[in-house]
Image (spheres, helix red, strand yellow):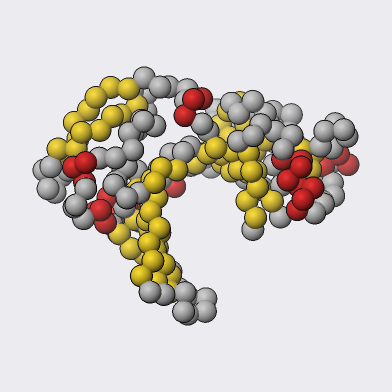
Amino acid sequence: MAKIHKIKSNGNTIYPATIPQAVVDPETQVPLNVTLDSVDGRLSDAEETISAIVGTDYLHYSYGIEINDSIADSAKTRIGNLSLHAQLPIQSRMRKCLLLDNGKVNYYLNANNGNLKEDGTAANLDGTDGMVMVEVPKHYRKFETEGTLFRVYISEMPISGFHIVPKMYISAYEASIDRTNASLPKLASVVNSSAAFRGGNNTATWMVHIGHYSADREQIHL
């Protein structure tokens, strides 16, 4: 099945204003000069490296998993900073929302009940208010191989050697096809069992349907 995957481009950043901040590592006391977003205190899109971290132990600032490719159904081993595995700083900021076709968030859903808006009133998940998506915050990622071992690390910090993963929206459900406009069907992430949303198709056709959105959407194959 397919899922909708929308990447939020830097040009569409809602709050681009930044303020300089000085952050000191609590263990090494090394000052880390970074740029933080003035609204939510997160690293700005333009900040992709922190020179003070280069050459130091990046495991302190990241967490991830290790898999042994030589072992069938290999168990995943937690690696990096184990306290971050407990805190899950990136996953804890993921939020369900209703996303309009223009890429703007219509509203966020209640963290404890996805059928409700944040304010506790009823949400409309049938597509009228937008696609049901999960907002994934911007973060940084590194892939590493050593023999048969494969590792992936993620971090809130733009560490040298990591690459940026922009803020994105991933469908909360496996995609269906919205045939409300029969001449321009599109992929949908909704709770809707009406005739316009029933049925599937092959991968090539799914790709055509997702193309009816803007160019920054793509499929995730499961």
Q: Quadrant of residue 189?
A: top right
Q: Where in the figure is residue 3, as x and y percent of width and height? A: 66, 48
Q: Visible in this render: residue 77?
A: no
Q: Visible in this render: residue 67?
A: yes
Q: Quadrant of residue 52?
A: top left
59 and 94: which is toward the camera: 59
Left or right: residue 74 compared with residue 177: left
Q: Residue at x 56, y 31 (%)?
A: 108
Q: Is residue 160 above or below residue 178?
A: below
Specify the quadrant that holds the C terminus: bottom right
State how many labels appear. Answer: 0
Left or right: residue 190 compared with residue 154: right
Q: Is residue 26 above or below residue 16?
A: below
Specify the quadrant that holds the N terminus: bottom right
193 and 217: which is toward the camera: 217
Q: Where in the figure is residue 142, as x and y percent of width and height? A: 38, 54
Q: Residue at x 43, y 39 (%)?
A: 138
160 and 102: which is toward the camera: 160
Q: Where in the figure is residue 104, as x and y percent of width and height? A: 59, 26
Q: Where in the figure is residue 159, as x and y percent of width and height? A: 29, 46
Residue found at the very far left of the displayed protein: 29
Left or right: residue 191 compared with residue 34: right
Q: Quadrant of residue 207?
A: top right
Q: Residue at x 59, y 38 (%)?
A: 6
Residue found at the very far bottom of the displayed protein: 71
40 and 13: which is toward the camera: 13
Q: Residue at x 46, y 38 (%)?
A: 166
